[in-house]
Amino acid sequence: MKRRFVVAITGASGAVYAVRLVEVLVAAGCDVHLTISSAGQAVLKHELDLAVDLEKFTPGMLLLDPWAGRDDPKLQRVRELAGISSEASNVLSVATGEPGQVIYHHWRDFQAPIASGSYLTHGMVICPCSGGTLSAIVHGTGANLIQRAAEVHLKEHRKLILVPRETPLSAIQLRNLARAAKAGAVILPAMPGFYHGATTIRDLVDFIVARICDQLQVENELIRRWGS
């Protein structure tokens, strides 16, 4: 079975991490089941000026189609800064053959396959993960597809990676992160390092995406690794 992952974008800052992550996973030949909350939609617009229609979504809305907006200098500038829609050879360590696909699910669609534990995946990433999403997951009060899919990954003992991006953190948020880790989730804050010779925004974004891919066992050469 082709490797398949769930990626959810929620309403925390750092939407660029998610867009770059989806690009890398698809280039690696993995299928990505993508879902975006309404707050995530607002963050994509505010931070990247991407108008994402949650009712009629297409991958080009996340700059994942290299031909979309190729004559728009603003979109090309976003790609340049964040490293989005680059050639697969620049983001992967090995040839992967056919790229993967993006399969979109509306965040309110509880009939989506990822809402069931019987639908097999190789892991889920919530990137970025908002405090509200975190709270719903650890308290078992899932009210949308993102939260339900996260609960499924925990109960099935599959990899669930949460990427919070908020500072400072309250005592409540810290307790929720600890609860999530105790339940089996991987807590991977969007805290980019600088030891790999970061000089651009793309370098900082790729540091986090590389660490996520490492957790998912997706080979990549996004960063210069320590000791290399």
Image: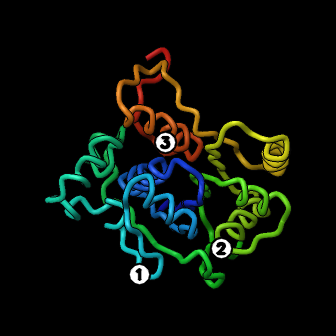
The earlier-in-sequence mark between 1 and 3 is 1
**Amino acid tagged 2:** Leu
* Direction from residue 191 to residue 83 in the image, left or right: left
Quarter of the image for residue 64 reads: bottom left
In this figure, which residue is indicated by the disc labeled 3?
209
* Cβ–Cβ under 8 Å for marks 1 and 3: no
Describe the element under mark 2 as helix, strand or loop: helix
Residue 202 sits above or below residue 31 on the image: above
Residue pictured at 60% horizontal, 64% vertical: 121
* Direction from residue 220 to residue 212 in the image, left or right: right
Q: CA distance from mark 2 to mark 1?
A: 17 Å
Residue 41 point in image, percent of width and height: 50, 66
Residue 227 point in image, percent of width and height: 48, 14
In this figure, which residue is indicated by the disc labeled 1?
56
Label 2 CA crowd tier, 10 Å (few <14, some 14–19, many 20+): many
Q: Residue furthest top?
A: 227
**Amino acid tagged 1:** Lys
Describe the element under mark 1 as helix, strand or loop: loop
- 222 or 15: which is nearer to us? 15
The earlier-in-sequence mark between 3 and 2 is 2
